[in-house]
Image (spheres, rainbow, N blue to C red):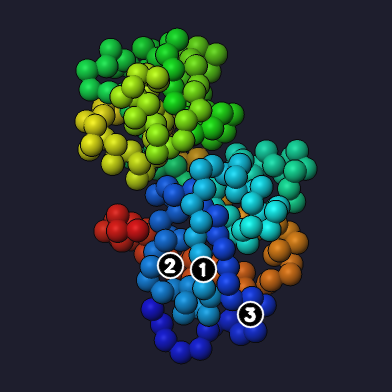
Amino acid sequence: PSSGPPKVSGLEKTDVTVGAVPVADEAGLYIAKDQGLFAAEGLHVTIDPILSSADATKGQNDGKFDITAGNVVSYVQDQVSHRSDLEIVAEGSLMQPDNQALYTLPGSPITTIADLKGRRIGVNVLNNIGTLLISSVLQEHGLSARDVHFVPISFPALGNALKRHTIDVAWLPEPTASADAENMGLAELTDLDQGATEGFPVGWYVATKTWAKKYPRTLEAFLGALKQGQQIADSSRTAVERA
């Protein structure tokens, strides 16, 4: 990390709490913290893990989080329903190969997307980005969301839900996917970076408009460090895996 005085002077506040779903999409955030990039900007950043982006906006509205990192669908839903008044401050991630996929237990009779008809698919929350991505893939293979049963289960518990046979298929993003695949021998059924959702925007960094207006220099410093973290994440797989 760079030494010397912070690049942005006159920070309105130096303690920043970020609510983030702990998935690989947010690797740049963790890298910026771990490598002292936020500290170099004069910021002390705390990252609070959250289960879903729905928790993110509630936490923001309650003043628990300054900035949140989550999926685009939750933020759009909150904005159009007027539950929140948000400002997108940075892009988080786009869909890319080997980042999100559907997984089954070894030896599962489900080996093709057509086999998903009538099956139970575990997702972290209903009516959100997971169901949107999966529904898009289903549609391209002649099925619809009505042909499957979505079951809400938190990411850390999805692998065990497969083992207990409470679901037939699990939607897993990285790094949960790699960990569960290694520990349980899970088989990838299909990568979700395909068709209409190839390159689809997955994550954003968001603040409330009130917060962004009140702390512009703090936000500028945060984004400066985050950008450096994202650049490292984009160029170093090792740094992402470590994060």
Mark 3 to mark 1: distance in Å? 13 Å
Circle count? 3
Provide the residue designation for mark 2: 32
Viewer-nearest of labels 2 and 1? 1
Q: Residues within 10 Å of mark 2 (few under 14, many from 20)?
A: many
- Image coordinates for residue 145, horizontal then vertical, percent: 53, 18
In this view, 116 is above or below 161: above
Mark closer to the chain start, 3 or 2: 3
Identified by mark 3, the residue type is Leu
Q: Quadrant of residue 114?
A: top left
Quadrant holding the N terminus? bottom left
* Disc 2 to disc 1: CB gap under 8 Å: yes
Check disc 2 and report its element: helix, strand or loop: helix
Is the C terminus in the top left, top right, bottom left or bottom right quadrant?
bottom left
Residue at the disc numbered 3: 11
Please tell me which residue is depicted at 44% across the width and 42% down the height of the picture. Answer: 95
Q: Is residue 129 above or below residue 88?
A: above
Seen from this angle, which residue lies furthest right?
82
Residue visible at 46% across and 35% down in the picture:
154
- Rounded to the nearest angstrom, the CA distance separating label 2 from label 1 is 9 Å
- Residue 37 falls in image quadrant: bottom left
Q: Reply above or below: 39 against 231.
A: below
Front position in the image: 91 or 5 = 5
> Which residue is at the far bottom?
4
Where does the image place residue 61, in percent across and percent down from the top left? Answer: 71, 52
Q: Label 1 belongs to which residue?
A: 45
Residue 105 picture quarter: top left
Q: Is residue 67 above or below residue 169?
A: below
Residue at x 40%, y 20% (from the top left corner): 167
Amino acid carrying label 2: it is Ala
